[in-house]
Image (cartoon, helix red, strand yellow):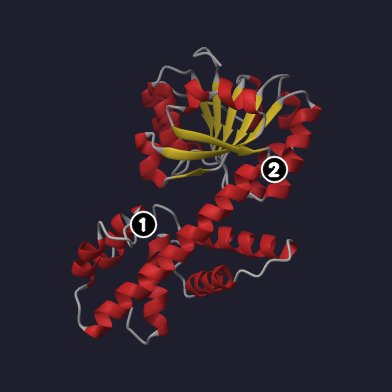
Amino acid sequence: MALQQRIGLLGTGKMGYPVARRLASAGYPVSVWNRSPDKAASLQTFGISLAASPAQLIANSNVVICFLGDARACDEVIFNNEATLQAIAANTVIIMMSTLSPDLVIEQQRKVNKVHADYLDMPVSGGTTGAENGTLSLMAGGNAPLIESLHPLLAHLGRVTRVGEVGAGQLTKLANQIIVAGTLSLLSEAFTLAARGGADPAKVREALLGGFADSTLLQQQGERMVTQDFHARGPAKWQLKDTRSAVALAEQLGLHLPLTTSVNQLFTQMIEAGDGELDHCAIIRQIQRLNGESI
């Protein structure tokens, strides 16, 4: 699709805000809607307009990107909201970048197709840093030619990989979240073991960089763990939402995922301990609690 496309973005939180800025800076006309308008107001500085309602935003956009927080918000704002659904013009493209369940996005596609519009399942990974720098991984499910036509726009956000039909994007994101949550839990155990044995966790991390244990998570979240920088880039409560979804889907498919089940229990305990608003790398605090360390 050409540069003249009018972009509407629903949800200007930690991911939606920088995505809106990037698209506006690339020359696209962008409007946004957020449940708390004050949190989106500063985007006007970058030439971005604020819509008074989701229906108004959708009526004035032909590409709509959704970054709403969860399934209930998506239903309230779009898919169970007749005013919003009726505002979707034919051939509008709804791009779902929120992390939801595969079954749910298939149902959303059905509702959007019913009003003769298009729907793509496209969750992202890379966090706020990726959103700010345009280095997100976009996991696309849906019509291949449509995804290809959107590459000029999406290239401003990161790298797009089509993984299948609608629903496959969310499956890929769940796989991503299994790896992220599991790796963070293992890093937490590794640093806790190192500290209890008398090694400096910061130096242990430094020594592991470049070896087989190296990863983006070791580089970024590992550093935050050892410096105890738990300001939320990706809140732990969102990580729990995703691990719960992964466990539920595994049960539905008749799969036993023992590691993911254990990691889900760890994040459940972490949230119950009151750390849900901290970054997901703060899972190290739960490992430390289990080992009798003061937090």
Q: Is residue 187 visible?
A: yes
Question: In the shown orientation, is residue 259 left or right of residue 43?
Answer: right
Q: Residues within 10 Å of mark 1 (few under 14, many from 20)?
A: some
State the quadrant of the C terminus: bottom left
Which dot marks residue 217? 1
The kind of residue tagged 1 is Leu
Q: Residues within 10 Å of mark 2 (few under 14, many from 20)?
A: many
Which is more toward the observer, 139 or 53? 139
Question: In the shown orientation, is residue 280 left or right of residue 215?
Answer: right
Viewer-side label of 1, 2: 1
Residue 168 is drawn in which quadrant? top right
Q: Name the residue located 47 percent from the left edge and 75 percent from the top edge.
A: 273
Given the current orientation, which residue lies at the most extreme bottom position?
292
Which dot marks residue 105? 2
Q: Name the residue located 66 percent from the left edge and 39 percent from the top edge.
A: 77
State the quadrant of the N terminus: top right
